[in-house]
C-alpha cells in the first residue's frame, strides 16, 4: 500500500496562531474516500449501506469500513460515520447490532439526527463520539445546550447563518467543550434542514431518510418573473471567507458531496486545503478559485455567510455551470468558439480524472494480514506471537496449559475462538500451532486472550461486549377518550379559548423580536392561551423567546425548537415536543422525558399507521397526533418571491420578515401546485396544494393518543372549508366522541384533502 507523503506541518510556523481548522470531506464511495485522503482531508464522512442520509450514494459495507479506517488513520485522516436519519421502531434491533460492532472499531465519530439514537449512544455506547447532524438545524444557543446534555461532542451549525451568528454559536459550543462545524462548499437546499417534506409527500422519498428526490431542482411552469427553476439556489462557497470563519472560532469546514464523483472530491478538497494552508501559514488568501469551477457547480454564492440573502443567490439552471463559466472567462463571442472551448474543457477534465484515478488506485483499503504463531506445552502458559505489517507482539495466557479439559486446542477450535480478529482492521492470514496434542485451556481464558489481542490491535482500546437493549413494554392503560387541541395564529381567533373546552395553542412567529411586547400582552390578558413555539428562532428571536418565557411565565408550552425546550426544562415549565421535532421511535420519547422532563410529544406525520403503532410511550407520558393541518413542505430563510412574482428589493432585511405579507404559487410539470405563503413575522413557507386530514387514526388507535390536534391557521390552498372555526372544532370534537356521521360530515365540509403519509410512511 502506498503511503501518502507526509503532510505539510500546517501549524508549525503558523503566522496567525496555532489553532487548527479541520477540513472535512465527503466520501460517497471508496474512490471518493481515497480521493479525499490523497487530496489532504483532515477528516472524511461516509455512510454504510443503511441508516444514512445519502441513500443515492454508493456507500460502503461494514467490512470495507475497517480497511478504510486503517488507510485513513495511517494518513492522519479521521473517519466519521453517518447514521443521520430518522430511525423507525422496527429498525432499532438492527441499529443496536450495528452499534455493537462499531463500538469495537476505531471510528472517530458518529453523525446523528434522531433523538432516539442520541439516547442509545449516550446511555449504552459511550465510547462512540456523537456529532449532531445538519438535519438538526442548530441555530441558537439553547439548542447547543440541549445537544450538550445529550453528550454531543460536535455540532454542525445551520447552513443559513451569517458570520456573526456563527461566531456567537461557536463561542457557546467552545464554552461547553463542543466542536463547531460549518458547511463551506457544495449544494445548498432552499429549505431549513430537517424540516423539508416536499420529497416525502410527493413520492414517499423522505429527506429525513436520505431519499430526497430533490424536487427543489425540478423544472416548474414558467413563473411571472420568467423563471423555470424558482427553488434552485447556487452552490455555497466560503472560499473567500476563511479568515472570518477562523476568527469566528469555527473548528471544522465541511464540504458537501457524497453523491459526487471522486474527481469532484479530489479537486475541491485539494483546492480548499491549499487555501487553508496558505492562510494559516502566511495569513493570505488566494484569489483564484478557477479550479472549483472545473468540477460540478451551479455557480457560487456566500450570501448567507455575508448576511446578504438576495436574489443573486438563485440560478435558473440546476445543471453544472462549468462550461458557462469557461465561456465567460474566455469571453467567447461566437457559438463556434463556445463549442471549441467546451471540448477543450472536457479534454482537460478527462486528463485530470485519469490522473486522479491513477493516484487513488495506488491506495488499498485491504485489511492488514496477521501472522499468528501459537505455542506452548503442558504446565506452561500459552504463547501467542502476532506479527502485523507494522509491528509484532506476544501475549501469554494467565493460566498454564493442562492435559485435560472440555475441548483440546486445535486449528479449527482456535480459529473459531479468534474469529473476532477478522472483524477488525486486520484478518488472520496465517495461523500456526506448535503445540503438543491434547492440551487445554479454560474457555474463559481463551476469551480473555482474544480480548487482549483485540485491545492491542485496536490501539489500546478495550473490547466492549455486545449489549442487549431491553425490549420496551407497553404500559397498561385504562381506556380513555382523547381530547382535542387547536392551533391558531391570528389575534382575531383568540375568542376560541373562551368558547371551547379544547386546548387552544397560539403560534408565535419566527420573527418574535419585532412584536415581542405585543405577544407578551396578548398572553397575559388571555391566560387560557398556550404558547406554540416555531422550529426556527435565530439570534435575537431566540433571545426574545427567552424573554417571553420570563415575562409570561406560562405553565405549559408546545415547542418545535429544542432551544426553547432546554429553557423550559431548566426553568421547570411543562412542555410538549411539537410535530416538527420529527419523533418516530420510542427511544426519542425516552430521551425527551428522561433528559428534559418533557411531559408529552407529537408523533411525526411522516410515518404510517403501522410505524406509529409500534411506538411505545414511557409511563406518564402523553402522545399527540395532528389529524388536520395545512401541510408544510418546506420553510426557507430565502425570499421565495424573487423567482416567482419578482420583488422590488434585491435582498432581504428585517422589514421583510416583519412587514411582508404575500402569497403565490408554483406548478411543476406533473401539474402539482405548491402554495407560497409569507405571513407577517414569519419566514417564507411552501405548502402542499391540499391539506392533511386523517380521521381514520381515531378509530385505528383509540387508546394510543392522549390528544388529537387540528391546525386552524389560515393558509390559502386548494382545500375548501365550508364552516366557521367554532363549527369545525365542534365537528372534530364529535369525531373524538364517536358521534355517528361526524367523520362523513368532516370530509364533506373540508375537501379536498390527503392522508397519503398515513398510508405510505417513510
Image: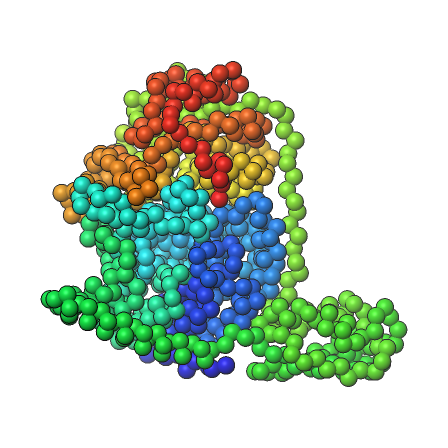
Horizontal and vertical percent for residue 371?
65, 81
* Most distant residue in the front direction: 336
Horizontal and vertical percent for residue 100?
61, 58
Instruction: Tell me what residue is drawn at x 31 percent, y 49 percent.
Output: 218
Instruction: Tell me what residue is drawn at x 34 percent, y 58 percent.
Output: 183
Q: Nearer the viewer, residue 13 or 415?
A: 415
Asked which quadrant contains residue 415, the reply is bottom right
Residue 518 placement, left or right of 383: left
Q: Nearer the viewer, residue 160 or 198?
A: 198
Instruction: Tell me what residue is drawn at x 65 percent, y 45 percent.
Output: 471
Asked which quadrant contains residue 450, the reply is bottom right
Horizontal and vertical percent for residue 40?
38, 74
**Looking at the image, how many numbered discs can be counted on the residues?**
0
* Most distant residue in the right direction: 404
Q: Nearer the viewer, residue 363 or 184?
A: 363
- 253 over 10 or under it: above or below: above
Asked whether residue 483 appears in the rendered view, the answer is yes
Asked whether residue 147 appears in the rendered view, the answer is no
Horizontal and vertical percent for residue 723?
35, 18
- 677 over 249 or under it: above or below: above
Residue 84 placement, left or right of 170: right
Asked which quadrant contains residue 396, the reply is bottom right
Instruction: Tell me what residue is drawn at x 45 percent, y 33 percent.
Output: 755
Amino acid at each position: 500500500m502506498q503511503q501518502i507523503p507526509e503532510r505539510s506541518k500546517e501549524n508549525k510556523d503558523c503566522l496567525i496562531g496555532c489553532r487548527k481548522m479541520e477540513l472535512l470531506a465527503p466520501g460517497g464511495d471508496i474512490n471518493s474516500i481515497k480521493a479525499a485522503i490523497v487530496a489532504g482531508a483532515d477528516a472524511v464522512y461516509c455512510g454504510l449501506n443503511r441508516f444514512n442520509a445519502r441513500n443515492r450514494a454508493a456507500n460502503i459495507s461494514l467490512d470495507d469500513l475497517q480497511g478504510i479506517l486503517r488507510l485513513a488513520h495511517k494518513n492522519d485522516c479521521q473517519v466519521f460515520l453517518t447514521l443521520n436519519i430518522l430511525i423507525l421502531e422496527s429498525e432499532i434491533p438492527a441499529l443496536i447490532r450495528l452499534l455493537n460492532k462499531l463500538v469495537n472499531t476505531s471510528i472517530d465519530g458518529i453523525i446523528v439526527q434522531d433523538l432516539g439514537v442520541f439516547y442509545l449512544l449516550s446511555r449504552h455506547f459511550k465510547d462512540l463520539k456523537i456529532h449532531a447532524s445538519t438535519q438538526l438545524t442548530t441555530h441558537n444557543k439553547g439548542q447547543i445546550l440541549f445537544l450538550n446534555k445529550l453528550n454531543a461532542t460536535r455540532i454542525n451549525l445551520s447552513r443559513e447563518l451569517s458570520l456573526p451568528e456563527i461566531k456567537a454559536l461557536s463561542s457557546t459550543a467552545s464554552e461547553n467543550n463542543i466542536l463547531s462545524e460549518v458547511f463551506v462548499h457544495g449544494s445548498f437546499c432552499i429549505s431549513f434542514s430537517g424540516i423539508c417534506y416536499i420529497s416525502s409527500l410527493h413520492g414517499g422519498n423522505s429527506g429525513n431518510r436520505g431519499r430526497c428526490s430533490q424536487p427543489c431542482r425540478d423544472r416548474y411552469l414558467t413563473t411571472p418573473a420568467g423563471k423555470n427553476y424558482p427553488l434552485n439556489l447556487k452552490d455555497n462557497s466560503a472560499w473567500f471567507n476563511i479568515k472570518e470563519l477562523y476568527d469566528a472560532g469555527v473548528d471544522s469546514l465541511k464540504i458537501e458531496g457524497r453523491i459526487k464523483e471522486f474527481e469532484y472530491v479530489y479537486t475541491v478538497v485539494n483546492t480548499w486545503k491549499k487555501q487553508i494552508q496558505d492562510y494559516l501559514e502566511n495569513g493570505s488568501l488566494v484569489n483564484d478559485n478557477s479550479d472549483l469551477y472545473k468540477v460540478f457547480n451551479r455557480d457560487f454564492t456566500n450570501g448567507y455567510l455575508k448576511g446578504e440573502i438576495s436574489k443573486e443567490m438563485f440560478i435558473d439552471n440546476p445543471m453544472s455551470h462549468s462550461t458557462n463559466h469557461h465561456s465567460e472567462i474566455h469571453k467567447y463571442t461566437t457559438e463556434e468558439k463556445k463549442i471549441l472551448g467546451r471540448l477543450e474543457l472536457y479534454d482537460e477534465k478527462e486528463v485530470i480524472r485519469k490522473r486522479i484515478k491513477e493516484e487513488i488506485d495506488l491506495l488499498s483499503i485491504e485489511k492488514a494480514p496477521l501472522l499468528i504463531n501459537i505455542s506452548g506445552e503442558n504446565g506452561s502458559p500459552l504463547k501467542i506471537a502476532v506479527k502485523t505489517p507494522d509491528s509484532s507482539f506476544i501475549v501469554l495466557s494467565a493460566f498454564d496449559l493442562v492435559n485435560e479439559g472440555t475441548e483440546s486446542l486445535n486449528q479449527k477450535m482456535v480459529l473459531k475462538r479468534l474469529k473476532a480478529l477478522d472483524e477488525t482492521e486486520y484478518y488472520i492470514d496465517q495461523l500456526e500451532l506448535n503445540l503438543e496434542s491434547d492440551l487445554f485451556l479454560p474457555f474463559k481464558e481463551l476469551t480473555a486472550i482474544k480480548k487482549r489481542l483485540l485491545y492491542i490491535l485496536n490501539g489500546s482500546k478495550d473490547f466492549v461486549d455486545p449489549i442487549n437493549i431491553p425490549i420496551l413494554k407497553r404500559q397498561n392503560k385504562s381506556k380513555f377518550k382523547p381530547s382535542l387541541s387547536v392551533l391558531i395564529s391570528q389575534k382575531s381567533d383568540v375568542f376560541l379559548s373562551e368558547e371551547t373546552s379544547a386546548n387552544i395553542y397560539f403560534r408565535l412567529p419566527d420573527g418574535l423580536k419585532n412584536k415581542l411586547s405585543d405577544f407578551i400582552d396578548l398572553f397575559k390578558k388571555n391566560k387560557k392561551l398556550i404558547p406554540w413555539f416555531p422550529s426556527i428562532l435565530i439570534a435575537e428571536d431566540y433571545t426574545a423567546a427567552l424573554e417571553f418565557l420570563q415575562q409570561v411565565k406560562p405553565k405549559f408550552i408546545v415547542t418545535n425548537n429544542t432551544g426553547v425546550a432546554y429553557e423550559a426544562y431548566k426553568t421547570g415549565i411543562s412542555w410538549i415536543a411539537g410535530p416538527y421535532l420529527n419523533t418516530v421511535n420510542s427511544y426519542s420519547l425516552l430521551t425527551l422525558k428522561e433528559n428534559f422532563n418533557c411531559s408529552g410529544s407529537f408523533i411525526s406525520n411522516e410515518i404510517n399507521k403501522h410505524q406509529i403503532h409500534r411506538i411505545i410511550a414511557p409511563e406518564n407520558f402523553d402522545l399527540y397526533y395532528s389529524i388536520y393541518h395545512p401541510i408544510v413542505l418546506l420553510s426557507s430563510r430565502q425570499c421565495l418571491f424573487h423567482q416567482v412574482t419578482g420583488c422590488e428589493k434585491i435582498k432581504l432585511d428585517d422589514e421583510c420578515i416583519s412587514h411582508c405579507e404575500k402569497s403565490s404559487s408554483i406548478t411543476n410539470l406533473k401539474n402539482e401546485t405548491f402554495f407560497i405563503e409569507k405571513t407577517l413575522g414569519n419566514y417564507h413557507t411552501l405548502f402542499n396544494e391540499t391539506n392533511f386530514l386523517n380521521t381514520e387514526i381515531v378509530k385505528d388507535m383509540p387508546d394510543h393518543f392522549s390528544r388529537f390536534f387540528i391546525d386552524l391557521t389560515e393558509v390559502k390552498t386548494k382545500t375548501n372549508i365550508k364552516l366557521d372555526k367554532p363549527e369545525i372544532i365542534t365537528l372534530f370534537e364529535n369525531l373524538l366522541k364517536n358521534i355517528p356521521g361526524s367523520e362523513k360530515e368532516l370530509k364533506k365540509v373540508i375537501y379536498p384533502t390527503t392522508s397519503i403519509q398515513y398510508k405510505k410512511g417513510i
